[in-house]
Image (spheres, grey):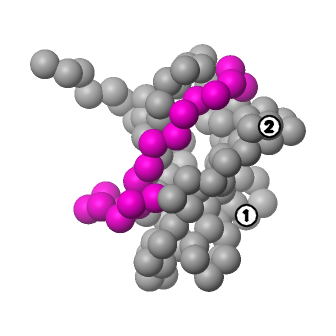
């Protein structure tokens, strides 16, 4: 039986979770977004991801709409903080009021 990994709910109030709660380099993290863009009717969403203070190894991942919101899997490429923000197909962004969404990597 597979064990369910707990999610990091640091930004749950903004509609953003990541699991496992403390991903490690080499893991695949599940990102779930039900925030402002999803609430305002976005039909396509992308998560923009980078690592560390300099947003190294940036990439955009298309998210899939589910009952939970929008979801995608993100490879944890570096052992540095994961930074992310979200955009829709109309180029509207949710970057947590300029603070972005950041999660520690163990």
Q: Would you place residue 34 above or below residue 26 in this image?
A: below
Location of mark 1 (residue):
97
Front disc: 2 or 1 = 2
68, above or below 89, in the image: above
Can you tell which quarter of the image residue 94 is in?
Answer: bottom right
The answer to whether residue 49 shows anywhere in this view is yes
Tell which of 93 and 16 is nearer to you: 93
60 relative to 37, above or below? above
Quarter of the figure with the C terminus: top right
Of the two numbered discs 2 and 1 on the same chain, state the one appearing first in sequence.
2
| Identity of the residue drawn at 47% across and 35% down | 29
Is 85 magenta? The answer is no
Q: Position of residue 75 (x, y in %)?
A: 54, 34
Q: Secondary structure at mark 1?
A: loop
Taking the spot 26% from the left edge, 62% from the top edge, the residue there is 67
Q: Nearer the viewer, residue 11 or 82?
A: 82
Residue extending furthest toward the left: 1
Residues shaded magenta: 63-80
Q: Residues within 10 Å of mark 2 (few under 14, many from 20)?
A: some
């Amino acid at each position: 039986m597979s064990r369910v990994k707990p999610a990091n709910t640091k930004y749950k109030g903004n509609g953003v979770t990541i699991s496992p709660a403390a991903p490690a380099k080499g893991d695949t993290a599940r990102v779930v977004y039900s925030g402002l863009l999803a609430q305002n009717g976005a039909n396509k969403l992308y998560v923009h991801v980078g690592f560390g203070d300099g947003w190294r190894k940036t990439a955009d991942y298309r998210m899939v709409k589910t009952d939970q919101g929008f979801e995608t899997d993100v490879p944890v490429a570096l052992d540095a903080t994961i930074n992310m923000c979200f955009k829709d197909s109309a180029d509207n962004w949710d970057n947590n009021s300029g603070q972005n969404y950041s999660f520690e990597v163990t």
